Image (cartoon, helix red, strand yellow):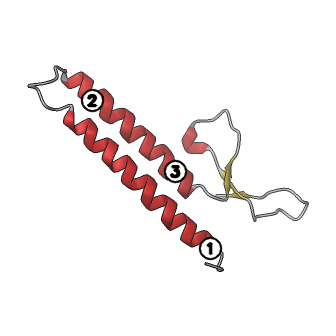
Amino acid sequence: MSEKETKRDRFVRVAEARTNKILHQIRLIGNLSNRCVYEYTNEDMEKIFAALEEEIAAQKERFQQEGKKKAFSFADDEEKRDFDEKADDGRGRQAKIP
């Protein structure tokens, strides 16, 4: 093959492989629900799914925040503003994007 793999082709190839691998691992976690083999509490189950949901949310945010930088603030998270990498205030600094 003389053609180079495009960034899109590489993304699709790697994303499919990694997603399928993770889905398989999640199914293995589901196997832990067999009470004939394992003993667990509802608290145990909640901890597992909270950890999974937290990590999925963090990775989803990475995709959504591409190209944006968080501004530092001592204020609450709701009051923080994003900076757009492409935005410039005319003085070589990044402008705030509301």
Q: Earlier in the sequence, mark 1 or mark 3?
A: 1
**Distance (Cα) linking label 2 and label 1:** 41 Å
Residue 19 versus residue 51: which sits nearer the camera? Answer: 19
What residue sits 48% from the left and 52% below the top? 60
Mark 1 vs mark 3: give the one in front: 1
Q: Earlier in the sequence, mark 2 or mark 1?
A: 1
- Density class for disc 1 (Cα within 10 Å; few <14, some 14-19, many ≥20) is few
Tell me the SS state at disc 2.
Answer: helix
Whole-percent x and y of residue 52?
Answer: 37, 38
Whole-percent x and y of residue 40?
Answer: 19, 21
Image: 79 above or below 10? above
* Label pair 2/1, CB-CB below 8 angstroms: no
Residue under circle 1? 6
Give the residue furthest to the bottom. Answer: 2
Q: In the image, is 70 to the left or to the right of 78?
A: right
Residue 33 versus residue 9: which sits nearer the camera? Answer: 9
Which of the labelled discs sits on residue 61, or is there none? 3
**Distance (Cα) linking label 2 and label 3:** 22 Å
**Distance (Cα) linking label 1 and label 3:** 25 Å
Which of the labelled discs sits on residue 46, or is there none? 2
What residue sits 55% from the left and 71% below the top? 9
What residue sits 59% from the left and 55% below the top? 65
Q: Three-letter amino acid code at disc 1?
A: Thr
Q: In the image, is 49 to the left or to the right of 11?
A: left
- Density class for disc 2 (Cα within 10 Å; few <14, some 14-19, many ≥20) is few
Q: Three-letter amino acid code at disc 3?
A: Glu
Q: Quadrant of the N terminus?
A: bottom right
Image: 26 above or below 32? below
Mark 2 vs mark 1: give the one in front: 1
* Label pair 2/3, CB-CB below 8 angstroms: no
